[in-house]
Image: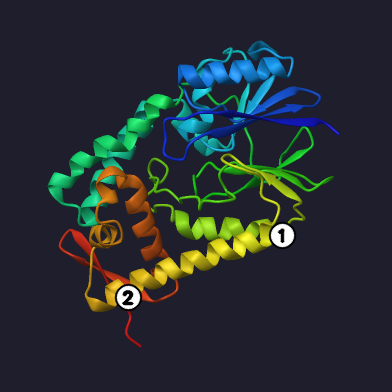
Amino acid sequence: MEQLHRIVVPTPFAVGDVNMYIIEGDRLTLIDAGVKTEEAWHVFVRELRELGYKPEHIEQVIITHHHPDHVGLLDYLPSTIPVIGHRKAAPWIAKDAAFFAWHQQYFEQFLMECGIGEEGIAKLGNFRRSLRFSCERSLTQEVKEGDVIEGWMVIETPGHAQSHIVLYRESDGLMIGGDHLLATISSNPLLEPPAIGEQERPKPLLQYNDSLKKLLNYDITTIVTGHGENVTDVAPLVEKRLEKQKERAEHVWKLLSEKPMTAFDVCRALFPTVYEREFLLTMSEAIGQLDYLEAIGAVKKQKDGQIYMYEVVRS
């Protein structure tokens, strides 16, 4: 059986260290590529050397998703190394100008509808702060649900990111899980714009719940994760995460039962101080719970001018 090695590198983000993996198979494969800092690169090179390799020995990189702490060091690796991932990672890791222009345009409109107001649009500048830790590389091979790479099956798990995939090895039940299911913290389903030209936005919390349940279809012994330790109790942890999410939705429903609110009102009620620092994270959480409550018929939204107001559905 091929060898799998974990390499842990530091990040400047609140989540802390990120895990990268080396697979010694038919081709020397790197799974995820850390964050673009000198410190992360030096730690990676040192750990790789202890395994007996140099960066130029890597024959391919597979990314579980496009977030900066999983792709940044692609800029340090030789440009000839193939980069494999989901097609939705492509514009992010290439820093596609047209995509980012669309991203800005879409969110300006969307956040106005969320009740953020003109002054709040300035917060959009913070959306892409973290991208300085990302990369500027092209995806050389796209993979999708059911594809097999070196004996690992690709499973699409959108939610935390639209580009998120996990890799599953049926022979021993091992899964390389990225940030899909973490041992001690809940993954955040993050807001993203629809593809260029599409109007229907993804609903990441609903996707994430479905992607979590999808794991129950596989005989998984261990998930090696993007942050922290391995997960071995997959089914109980999935149930725990889903139950916790229902509790958060219940809290939002109680807020709305007192009075109709905008998505931004809900965000500030849930995160009265944190929302200033973690705007995307907290708005993603608020809108995710509203999407969930709307999907189960517990709340409805109505447009009041340019702004959507949410209210409970009275039975």
Q: Which residue was labeled with disc 1?
A: 217
Disc 2: CA contacts within 10 A as few (<14), some (14-19) or many (>=20): few
Q: Please say whether residue 94 is visible from this viewpoint.
A: yes
- Name which residue type carries label 1: Asn
Quarter of the view holding residue 197: top left
Rendered position, 66 above or below 254: above
Q: Residue at x 42, y 43 (%)?
A: 195
Q: Compared to 127, does 24 lie above or below?
A: above
Answer whether residue 91 is visible to the viewer in this image.
no
Q: Residue at x 51, y 35 (%)?
A: 89
Question: In the image, residue 99 lies at what x, y percent?
Answer: 38, 33
Q: Is residue 190 left or right of residue 175?
A: left
Describe the element under mark 1 as helix, strand or loop: loop
Observer-nearest residue: 58 or 297?
Answer: 58
In this figure, which residue is indicated by the disc labeled 2?
A: 254
Q: Amino acid at mark 2?
A: Lys
Q: Position of residue 58 (x, y in %)?
A: 68, 18
Who is closer to the viewer here, 2 or 145?
A: 2
- Quadrant (top left, top right, bottom left, bottom right) of the N terminus: top right
Q: Could you say which is closer to the camera, residue 249 or residue 155?
A: 249
